[in-house]
């Protein structure tokens, strides 16, 4: 193979027990496809900081919730910044990569997002609901999520907690992007089965909704997933802007869509490395 091929360190936890998702299968497939363009090695997220000096870039994929290894993840970020190592997605993402603060920021800015507050004095700003979702600002994968009645919220110890109304929705839908290029959309027709996904054909309004958050995040390169819920009235509300290690559900799309995604990702990585 050519000696000048870029060298990628592909970070993944192949054995992470994700509910309803097969991280390992997805990353084995995608890594195999990227090997056509790059010299590539897989490593566990706990090994990334030590191994990255020998590579042109680190690609963070299905590495699991960093809540389980927060100290090591912060050390990885610090070392990558100190060494000038290119990390894909770049480390300045404003979505889940930086915690859930963006839900507060987007609420305050009037974006179509599930209303979110983090202080007891702001609870009155939330719309009335039968229950309210309480989650850690640094949480992921529904870790620490609980549902409470409004009367119980005043007794919480705030600081690192977010509160949202529990939204009655018709279904959840996710929009997948590489850089600012839309790739495909998937939705869960049954709200009780979040990861039983089917292809979804977005309307122009749907894509305009998703692009608002891609534009807001200002990442020139990277994979992003915009998760939204469809309200009974027909509108969309943002649930999550995943820009750290979004699972792609590539097993739920047709082979031509998978191939197009992989090709777009390879081109994005080449452009990223040349910048």
Image (cartoon, helix red, strand yellow):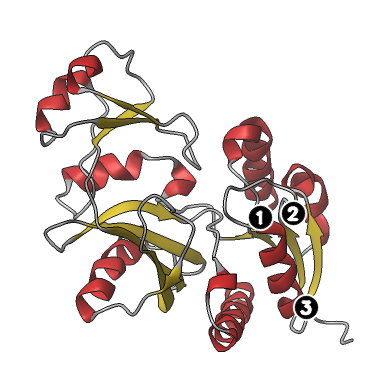
Left or right: 198 in relation to 150: right
User: Helix or strand or loop: what does disc 1 sit on?
Assistant: loop
Q: Earlier in the sequence, mark 2 or mark 1?
A: 2
Asked if residue 75 is positioned above or below residue 11 in the image, the reply reads above
Asked if residue 148 is positioned above or below residue 28 in the image, the reply reads above
Indicate which label's residue lies in the foreground, 1 or 3. 3
Residue designated by label 3: 35
Residue 174 placement (x, y as % from top left): 39, 64
Report, in whole angstroms, how far the alpha carbon at label 2 lies from the one at label 1: 27 Å
Q: Earlier in the sequence, mark 1 or mark 3?
A: 3
Residue 199 placement (x, y as % from top left): 43, 75
Residue 140 placement (x, y as % from top left): 49, 40
Q: Is residue 57 visible?
A: no
Asked if residue 258 is positioned above or below residue 59 in the image, the reply reads below
For the point 46% across and 34% down, the residue is 138
Residue designated by label 1: 84
Report, in whole angstroms, how far the alpha carbon at label 3 lies from the one at label 2: 17 Å
User: Helix or strand or loop: what does disc 3 sit on?
Assistant: loop
Indicate which label's residue lies in the foreground, 2 or 1. 2
Residue designated by label 2: 14
User: Helix or strand or loop: what does disc 2 sit on?
Assistant: loop
């Amino acid at each position: 193979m050519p000696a000048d091929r870029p060298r990628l360190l592909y970070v993944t936890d192949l054995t992470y027990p994700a509910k309803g998702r097969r991280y390992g299968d997805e990353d084995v497939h995608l890594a195999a496809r990227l090997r056509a363009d790059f010299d590539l090695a897989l490593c566990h997220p706990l090994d990334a900081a030590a191994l990255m000096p020998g590579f042109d870039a680190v690609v963070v994929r299905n590495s699991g919730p960093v809540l389980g290894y927060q100290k090591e993840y912060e050390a990885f970020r610090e070392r990558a910044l100190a060494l000038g190592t290119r990390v894909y997605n770049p480390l300045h993402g404003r979505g889940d990569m930086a915690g859930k603060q963006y839900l507060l920021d987007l609420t305050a800015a009037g974006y179509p997002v599930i209303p979110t507050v983090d202080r007891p004095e702001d609870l009155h700003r939330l719309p009335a609901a039968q229950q309210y979702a309480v989650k850690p600002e640094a949480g992921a994968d529904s870790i620490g999520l609980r549902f409470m009645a409004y009367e119980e919220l005043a007794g919480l110890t705030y600081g690192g907690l977010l509160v949202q109304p529990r939204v009655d929705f018709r279904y959840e839908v996710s929009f997948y992007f590489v850089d600012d290029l839309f790739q495909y959309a998937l939705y869960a027709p049954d709200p009780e089965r979040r990861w039983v996904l089917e292809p979804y054909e977005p309307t122009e309004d749907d894509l305009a909704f998703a692009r608002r958050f891609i534009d807001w995040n200002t990442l020139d390169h990277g994979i992003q997933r915009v998760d939204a819920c469809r309200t009974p009235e027909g509108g969309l509300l943002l649930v999550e802007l995943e820009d750290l290690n979004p699972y792609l559900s590539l097993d739920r799309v047709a082979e031509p869509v998978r191939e197009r995604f992989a090709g777009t990702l390879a081109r994005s990585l080449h452009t990223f490395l040349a910048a």
